Structures are given as structure tokens and as C-alpha cells.
């Protein structure tokens, strides 16, 4: 049955065989994500308008400044369409500010800052303090196997608490949670798109193909 379903997908819709990934291109390092997708031979498109959401099979929300991405999302009429796309199961991967955008709760949002939500968790922005607000480390991500991920954290958030729906994919040595998954959603505090690491994008693409 599984085989025939897969075959049917190949015949019926080309999107499962050759998905198009949108990268939210309002602010932040969306170009780097587009470059990684190109390296993986995946079709991608920068997303700036709500009417583009119908053309994509998955979406990446890049790193940047979450309060700015939030403002631009609302200004350009993307916030509500994105929220309903997330609720309807669109696979979305958020890195850093992107993860903040996907959190149900932001612990220390600036005044008026909103998230799109989806992830059953609380995220804290700029959680690593000013002295070490950027650092790199080798991070064990069990679902990706060996070797560990070279993870770069830039004024990064941490996942402060996780509700029952979200799953932890990776934590730092001190226990702070920095990678999470929940159904159609994937989130990392760090930026694989900056270190030549493609396994998180591959992991996300498997989610897109399964959706
Ligand atoms: N500190 C940023 C924020 O609050 C996130 C930083 C990043 O995306 N590298 O959105």
C-alpha cells in the first residue's frame, strides 16, 4: 500500500517528486538559504507576497531580526495567510529569528511583537547574553547521526520550555534546547545555512516530501 501511494504521488502531483521551497524574503539571511537549496538541486523561490504561498510545498523562515520580520509580515498582509498555512500543515523550517516567528510564546518580545505561532513552546530571544552572543560549537543532533553539526549561534534564541506537542531534537551540553520539531514544523536556534551544513535542510525536505 505504501508503495502504491508513493507511485500515485509521482503520477498525480509532481510536487512530491520535485518540491518547490519558498524562503520568506522580507529581511534576514534568505539568500543563504536559497544558496543551500540550490546546492541540493532543489527549486526555490523568495516569498514576499501571500499569493505566492500557493506555489510552494514548504517554507523556510530565515534568521534576521524577528521583530522586523514580524512587522513586515503584518505590513505586507502575510501574517494571517502564513498562520493559516501553518495550521493547514504547510511544512515550515525556521532558523533563529525564524524559530522565534514559529513559537507560540516569545518570553521577551519587544512591545507589540507577535509571532505566527505553531510550535508548542516558549522561546527566549538573545538568550546567550552580550559577551557570548555569537559562538560556534559541535552539536550532537541524534536524528542526523554522525558527525555532529557545526552550529553557529548569532544573537540566538533558546527554547525555554517545550509543551507536549513539540519534540526536542538537540540540546547544548548545559541542557539548553536549540533544535525542535513538531509535525510539519522544524526549528533551530542556529544557522546551518552559514556553515555548509545541508543535513537540516535535507531533514526538512523529507518532511516536505512526506506532507
Ligand atoms: N536576535 C534575533 C531576534 O530576536 C535573532 C538573531 C538571528 O536570527 N540570528 O530575532
Image (tube, helix red, strand yellow):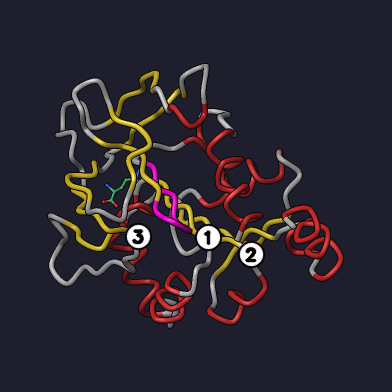
Quadrant of the drawing holding the N terminus: bottom right
Residue 3, numbered circle = none
For this rendering, which residue is in front, 207 or 8? Answer: 8
Magenta portion: prevailing SS class: strand
Q: Residue at x 18, y 34 (%)?
A: 128
Residue 34 in the figure: left or right of residue 84 = right
Relative vertical location of residue 82 with respect to residue 171 in this rendering, above or below: below
Q: Determine crowd level at label 3: few under 14, some 14-19, many 20+ residues with C-alpha closer than 10 A.
A: many
Please check the rendered image and state whether residue 165 is part of the magenta-colored stretch, yes or no.
no
Relative vertical location of residue 6 with respect to residue 197 in this rendering, above or below: below
Residue 103 in the figure: left or right of residue 207 = left
Relative vertical location of residue 145 with respect to residue 21 in this rendering, above or below: above
Query: Badge 2 is on which residue?
Result: 57
Q: Determine crowd level at label 1: few under 14, some 14-19, many 20+ residues with C-alpha closer than 10 A.
A: many
Specify the segment rendered in magenta: 182-188
Query: Badge 3 is on which residue?
Result: 102
Q: Earlier in the sequence, mark 1 or mark 3?
A: 1
CB contact under 8 Å: marks 2 and 1: yes
Q: Residue at x 17, y 44 (%)?
A: 160
Q: Earlier in the sequence, mark 2 or mark 1?
A: 2
Q: Residue at x 32, y 63 (%)?
A: 68
For this rendering, which residue is in front, 114 or 169? Answer: 169
Residue 78 position, x and y percent, is: 44, 77
Disc 1, SS: loop
**Separation of disc 1 and disc 3 at Cα?**
11 Å
Is the CB atom of the residue marked by disc 2 within 8 angstroms of ligand 1's nearest atom? no
Disc 2, SS: loop
Residue 91, numbered circle = 1
Q: Residue at x 52, y 29 (%)?
A: 144
Amino acid at each position: 500500500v505504501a508503495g502504491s501511494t508513493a507511485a500515485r504521488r509521482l503520477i498525480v502531483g509532481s510536487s512530491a517528486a520535485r518540491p518547490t521551497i519558498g524562503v520568506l524574503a522580507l529581511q534576514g539571511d534568505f539568500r543563504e538559504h536559497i544558496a543551500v537549496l540550490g546546492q541540493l538541486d532543489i527549486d526555490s523561490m523568495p516569498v514576499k507576497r501571500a499569493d505566492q504561498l500557493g506555489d510552494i510545498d514548504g517554507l523556510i523562515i530565515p534568521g534576521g531580526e524577528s521583530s522586523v520580520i514580524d512587522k513586515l509580515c503584518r505590513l505586507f498582509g502575510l501574517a494571517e495567510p502564513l498562520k493559516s498555512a501553518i495550521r493547514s500543515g504547510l511544512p515550515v523550517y525556521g532558523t533563529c529569528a525564524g524559530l522565534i516567528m514559529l513559537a507560540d510564546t516569545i518570553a521577551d518580545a519587544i512591545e507589540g511583537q507577535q509571532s505566527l505561532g505553531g510550535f508548542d513552546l516558549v522561546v527566549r530571544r538573545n538568550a546567550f547574553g552580550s559577551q557570548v552572543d555569537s559562538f560556534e560549537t559541535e552539536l550532537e543532533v541524534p536524528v542526523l547521526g554522525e558527525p555532529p553539526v557545526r552550529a553557529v549561534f548569532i544573537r540566538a534564541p533558546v527554547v525555554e520550555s517545550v509543551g507536549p506537542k513539540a519534540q526536542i531534537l538537540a540540546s547544548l551540553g548545559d541542557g539548553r534546547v536549540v533544535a525542535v520539531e513538531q509535525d510539519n514544523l522544524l526549528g533551530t536556534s542556529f544557522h546551518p545555512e552559514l556553515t555548509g551544513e545541508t543535513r537540516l535542510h535535507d531533514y526538512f525536505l523529507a518532511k516536505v516530501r512526506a506532507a
